[in-house]
Amino acid sequence: MKSNLSTDIASGNHEAYKKVFMAYFPKVKYFIVSFVKSEAVAEELAQEVFAKLWEDREKLASVQSLNAYMYRMARNITLNYIEHTLVEKKYLQQLAQYDYDEGQNIEEDLIARETELLVKLTVDKMPEQRKKIYQMSREEGLKNDDIAKRLNIKKKTVENHLNIALKEIRKSILLLYLFF
């Protein structure tokens, strides 16, 4: 691939993106299949790689090797998928071992656990700064002023990130309840 394809895509050139897609999609998919052992999953993840490539295209202007960049993206997305799958399996194993002898309502507990997992997954997908701010606020119990000082940002920025994070979480939970 010509090195100027990166800068062409960075500037929003759809033809350059199409060339890269046509050249790299089969390679990226094959690379991912070697990890996930599923053609269908590999195809989805490869599509995610190219969606992210387009979303973050401005970063391509400074990329030295498009080939290395593509495979690094594929590797990271694949590792995130594998990690998510392991977390989900662990959750299901814990759920299967849960002791309901105390007369708890199984359905309520299941919904609570699913909601908790959904919140965790939603937070994990957030941009790094928002995720860090949310965790400092909700998991560490820090006040907005303290978070702002620690991260050397304005309190209003912390509040904005928390508002967006909470909206994302509410949206995910609402979707969960719409399906159940």
Image (spheres, rainbow, N blue to C red):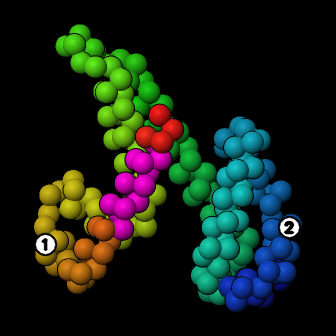
Name above or below for residue 36 compared with residue 64.
above
Helix or strand or loop: what does disc 2 sit on?
helix
Name the one closer to the observer, 90 or 62.
90
Q: Residue 159: image x %, image y %?
A: 25, 74
The dot on residue 146 is: 1
Magenta segment boundaries in residue numbering: 164-176
Which of the 4 image quarters holds residue 148? bottom left
Query: Which amino acid, mark 1?
Result: Asp
Q: Which residue is mark 2?
A: 23
Q: Residue 120: image x %, image y %?
A: 37, 48
Which of the 4 image quarters holds residue 60? bottom right
Q: Is residue 177 left or right of residue 142?
A: right
Name above or below for residue 172 compared with residue 96.
below
Q: What secondary structure characterizes most of the magenta part? A: helix
Precedes in sequence: disc 1 or disc 2 = 2
Q: Residue 134: image x %, image y %?
A: 28, 62
Query: Which amino acid, mark 2?
Result: Ala
Which of the 4 image quarters holds residue 163? bottom left
Residue placed furthest toward the top: 101
Q: Is residue 178 left or right of residue 49?
A: left
Q: Residue 22: image x %, image y %?
A: 86, 66
For the point 70% across and 77% down, the residue is: 65
